[in-house]
Image (cartoon, rainbow, N blue to C red):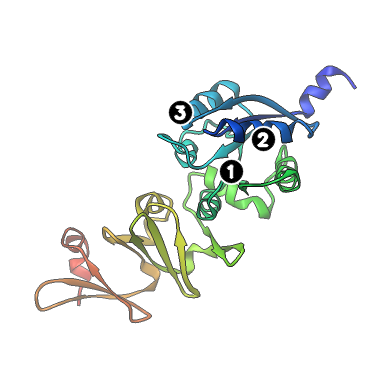
């Protein structure tokens, strides 16, 4: 096999983590994988963005929580075509966020060679081929269109939930609760970030803390004191802020 042929089979990989020991550990594990070629390392999000644009790696092993620019912030500045992303994190809630944002896989620290190999097998399966159904979430993240599914934690597993089945989203502190027909799911995303990925004809922001699915809206009701209330088919009633009430006042009855 020629040197040029070998080079084409290698997957160029960038390691991003703010902890030197974590980077060294990953580098050591990757040395045992003959089709991975580490092209560089970055110790923070801004350096990661610069390295991704400069080195154009096929794969980025990206830590979620870093000072300043986080791994999630890095996703917003990926070039086109974008590299495959595998999130690494010490926090289970960040693992869920990785799936919500479309990472190909996540590695929950501490992880070993076997778990890393399983994640990398998904990378190798996806490179150079149309994204199969199991990788649809990555394609959705790269696409400009609205998100069709969310990925939520259920016990020890992560499961898809159709966006159409969400009744409303509620901002609670620094996370969002998705109220679905099947129950409630916690999403570790800002409501504004989520709103930007949803179909505007279907979802409407009625309050700074509430985003409703108009498909599940029964009516708007105006109270005697002038307040506007959104009533869902399930009977749930949600307040409409004064600024948003101007948009929906003609629909109130």
* Crowding at mark 2 (Cα within 10 Å: few <14, some 14-19, many 20+): some
Q: Secondary structure at mark 3?
A: helix
Residue 58 makes an appearance in the image: no
Q: Quick one: 91 or 164, which is closer to the camera?
A: 91
Quadrant of the snapshot with the C terminus:
bottom left
Disc 1 or 3, which lies upstream in sequence? 3
Quadrant housing residue 30: top right
Whichever of labels 2 and 1 marks the residue nearer the N terminus, that label is 2
Q: Which residue is mark 3?
A: 46
Dot 2 and dot 1 residues touching (CB under 8 Å) = yes
- Image coordinates for residue 224, horizontal then vertical, percent: 10, 78
Horizontal and vertical percent position of residue 9: 79, 29
Task: Identify the residue position indicated by label 2 in the image.
Answer: 26
State the CA–CA distance, disc 2 to disc 3: 20 Å
- Judged from this view, the residue extending furthest toward the left is 225
- The disc, 2 or 3, on the residue closer to the chain's N-terminal end is 2
In this figure, what is the number of numbered marks?
3
Q: Is residue 24 above or below residue 136?
A: above
Q: Residue at x 67, y 35 (%)?
A: 26
Q: Is residue 82 above or below residue 213?
A: above
Q: Look at discs 2 and 3 and give the one toward the viewer.
A: 2
Disc 2 element: helix
Measured as percent of width and height from the top left, residue 105 is found at: 63, 48
Of marks 1 and 3, the one in the foreground: 1
Residue at image mark 1: 88
């Amino acid at each position: 096999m020629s040197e040029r042929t070998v080079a084409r089979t290698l997957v160029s990989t960038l390691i991003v983590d703010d902890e030197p020991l974590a980077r060294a550990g990953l580098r050591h594990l990757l040395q045992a994988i003959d089709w991975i070629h580490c092209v560089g390392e970055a110790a923070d999000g801004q350096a990661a963005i610069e390295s991704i644009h400069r080195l154009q790696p096929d794969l980025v092993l990206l830590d979620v929580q870093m000072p300043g620019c986080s791994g999630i912030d890095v996703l917003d500045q990926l070039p086109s075509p974008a590299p495959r992303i595998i999130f690494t994190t010490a926090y289970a809630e960040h693992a869920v966020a990785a799936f919500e944002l479309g990472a190909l896989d996540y590695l929950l620290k501490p992880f070993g060679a076997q778990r890393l190999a399983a994640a990398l097998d998904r990378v190798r399966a996806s490179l150079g081929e149309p994204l199969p159904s199991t990788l649809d979430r990555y394609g959705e993240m790269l696409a400009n269109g609205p998100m069709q599914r969310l990925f939520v934690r259920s016990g020890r597993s992560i499961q898809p939930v159709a966006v159409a089945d969400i009744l409303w989203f509620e901002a609670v502190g620094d996370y969002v609760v998705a109220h679905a027909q099947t129950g409630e799911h916690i999403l570790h995303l800002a409501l504004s970030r989520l709103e930007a990925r949803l179909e505007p004809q279907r979802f409407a922001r009625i309050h700074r803390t509430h985003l409703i699915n108009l498909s599940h809206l029964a009516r708007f009701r105006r109270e005697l004191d002038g307040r506007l209330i959104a009533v869902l088919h399930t009977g749930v009633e949600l307040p409409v802020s004064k600024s948003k009430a101007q948009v929906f006042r003609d629909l109130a009855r």
